[in-house]
Image (cartoon, grey):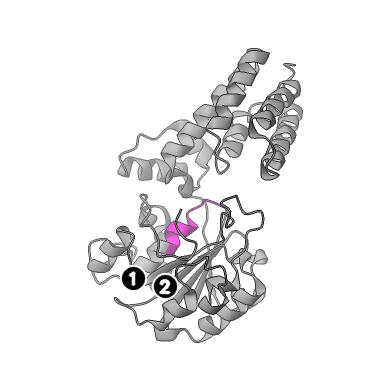
Amino acid sequence: MTDPASPLGGLPALSAATLHGPLLEQTGAFRGNALLLTGPARVGRRALALAVAAQHNCSGVRGMYGEACGTCPSCRALAAGGHPDVLLVEPRATTTTGKAARRRIIPIGAVLEGRDKGRDYEVHVYEFLEVRPTFRRRVVVVNGAEFLGQEAANALLKLVEEPPHGALFVFIAEDVRSVLPTIVSRSGRLSVPPVADRALEFALAQGGVSPDPDLVAFAAGRSGVLAEHATVLAALAGAADFTRALEEGLLPALDAASALEKHWDAAWHPEALRFAWRHLPPPARARADTALEALQEALEAYANPALSFQVFALRLREALGSA
């Protein structure tokens, strides 16, 4: 896993210009110190933030919406995941012991090397911005501005107000109300909306992927879902197989629960299961949701996974009237 504050891993496969061209027209002309991109999870805010970073460092001929050329040295460096002027800062996904972090936070240690006592970050914002840009502009993308700790936010404010070498901050959050007002007041704000299904289908076709109806329906306008289409399709198939097995009998249900546990993806399976249950009557769907929430709580508490999934299958069979 990439370090939360390390140079990013590369441009997303789907074109931000295809999906959010009108927004790129605005970001390309932005001359302030900080942008705040808000919108639903997986709607494409991160991809747009990277496209903004590309815009502000591109030396080639811009596209129709002012998007980066994709071929100049800066664009090639970003696509290769080694851009020297772009830094991604995110909440830690795991603890120092390798377990999932229960509390998502961007601490002061991500900003200042001297405060990173556990040496959790390879690159720190303050030290990163001390260096002059290799291309045009240093860009710090804060993916999860709502998770900034008070100390970290205060340290960033000083940098936002007087950014070294004209650096640009791009803050990303789901809801502007969850971001500290001091960050909001110093940022230009843009809302990133879901896109039309036709735009998603076109983006998939551009990437050489056949538009799957279930994938497009599941995405519901969130382009970030399509960036991991193979993983999502596997989760959708697993959720559908598990749901069918629940009605076939107790032993098939328990076997399916064991298979689901082995391939469980906490990022996608819960939503894929709810998608598989979308046609259930509301009372049954509510009971199934309750069973799923109980499973997630058990896994977060590090309960025995095999037993937790077996109990989940039994509760679901009861919720669906198959007990």
- Dividing the picture into quadrants, the one containing residue 202 is top left
Residue name at image x 37 percent, y 42 percent: 204
Above or below for 182 versus 279: below
Residue 293 falls left or right of residue 230: right
Name the spot of residue 120 as percent of width and height, x first.
53, 65
Pointer 2 residue: 139
Residue name at image x 43 percent, y 85 percent: 164
Residue 186, magenta (yes or no): no
CA neighbours of label 1 inside 10 A, class few (<14), some (14 to 19), many (20+): some
**Label 2 sits on what residue type?**
Val
- For label 2, the SS is strand
Name the spot of residue 312 as percent of width and height, x first.
69, 29
Residue 311 falls left or right of residue 240: right
**Label 1 sits on what residue type?**
Pro
- Dividing the picture into quadrants, the one containing residue 168 is bottom left
Q: Is residue 31 visible?
A: no
Pointer 1 residue: 84
- For label 1, the SS is loop
